[in-house]
Image (spheres, helix red, strand yellow):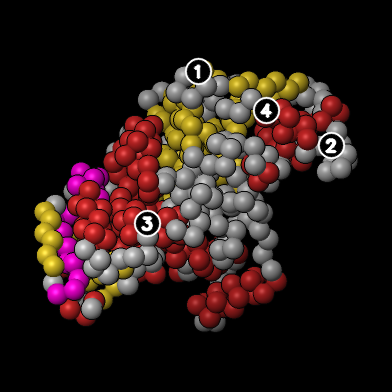
Amino acid sequence: MLVRFWGTRGSLPVAQHADTALTKVVRALLIARGREFADEAEAAAFARTEMEFATYATFGGATSCVEIEGGEEAFVICDMGSGLRDFGLSALRRCAEGHPRVYHFFLSHLHWDHIMGFPYFRPAYESGASIVIHAGHADAEQALRRQQEAISFPVPFDELKARIEFVTHLPMDPFEAAGMQVTLIRQTHARGSFGYRFEKAGKAVVYSTDAEHRPDDMDFDEGQFEAFFEKADLVVCDTMYSLAEEASLKQDRGHSSNLVAVDLCHAAGAKRLALFHHEPSYSDDDIQRMFYETLRYEGLVRAGRPKLEVVCAYDGLEVEV
Amino acid sequence: MDWGLRNDGGQLVASPTGRVDEESWKDFSTQLNAAVQEALAGTIPVLVIDLSGLEYMTSKGLRALTVAKNEARGAVTIRLAAPNGTMRRILSISRYDMLFPVVDHVDSAR
């Protein structure tokens, strides 16, 4: 399986300001210190090896959308945030090269940042495309239709030409889709959300975003999630807040922290953790600092376990599983 | 994890030793909440957690501190004293050093 991140930001899409780009260029010039490069490829290689990620790149600003490549004869996509637009354009190119025009979506929940990309999903406007939308919420269709009502969007849902089917699933009741075994878990979030575990050929990927792990429910809640994450090859986890924020000022907002994600993955024996659903007010520097702190924490509490590999998701990241 | 509790002239001092992790957090939380209740019952305004004997604490231990703070309902102040280097880094990474006063010595928590 190949996991491809099209949108990694939480709550609200984020765009870079002009000054942000200028700051990156200035830093890069100071690091290069007049060095000459034969071509762009050599300059890019220098940037990747000599600069921090937040200097030469950006974590991006599109909201949640993650593709899991490896489904049989179908695309597999978690959530429809604003990152879905770019996925749709990529999918059209791949379909032109022969990929079946079949899409299986798995919705964590129906909040706006997780469905806002669908009206801009070009394949939905194609008569030959087939779209299956899997959700734990029975009112997924209502949510998608409502955001294309005239007050919000010029093209009504009924003008979409693809064949669109909605399927509602129960938690902890595994089913087959696109050649994968899929299991949902109910998560704590406003109006509830669902995490997904995808398994195929002995590999497991978990997508768990918009999930709060409350201090007053650690025993029951986290026991469930440790089992759900068990020995996963990759866990994509909501790490929007610091632990202190999650447990105090932002309690009941429905999000988790980097420390809880590490502890759950350690207890579950997971191999790799992807930090995800980044706080929209965070700059690239803030996200990078959170990433470094997570690496440090993982090392401090590893206690003889195998190392948990931690990656910080960004728009465009690909992780081979 | 082992646990000690003493009344030290107007403040309760709890002394956990070892690690607070997924194996021991429930015991830590139980002892901590009992200490808060003892402070409330004795109208002792300060509970100091002497961290000098603690190797480290994971997120469950930290969140147990939050539960205890909620139990204290503002009537008992919980202070963290004498963390080792590892605990100091964990308190910083988690931002728990912004939720709880952290002091270098048990005595300076007075």
Three-letter code for the amino acid on which mark 4 is drawn: Asp
Q: Could one spot residue A72 in this view of the protein?
A: no
Q: Chain of mark 3?
A: B
- Residue A96 higher or lower than B104, as above or below: above
Calculate the distance from the C-alpha at mark 2 to the C-alpha at mark 3. Answer: 45 Å
Give the structural element (helix, strand or loop) at label 2.
loop
Three-letter code for the amino acid on which mark 2 is drawn: Glu
Residue drawn where x is 58% and y is 38% of the image: A191
State which region is magenta: B9-29
Mark nearer the viewer, 4 or 1: 4
Can marks 2 and 1 be said to lie on one chain? yes
Give the structural element (helix, strand or loop) at label 3.
helix
Q: Which residue is mark 2?
A: A149
Mark nearer the viewer, 1 or 3: 3
Q: Find out whether residue B14 is within the magenta segment.
A: yes
Q: How many marks?
A: 4
Q: Kindly identify which numbered label has been placed on residue A175.
A: 1
Q: Which residue is mark 4?
A: A139
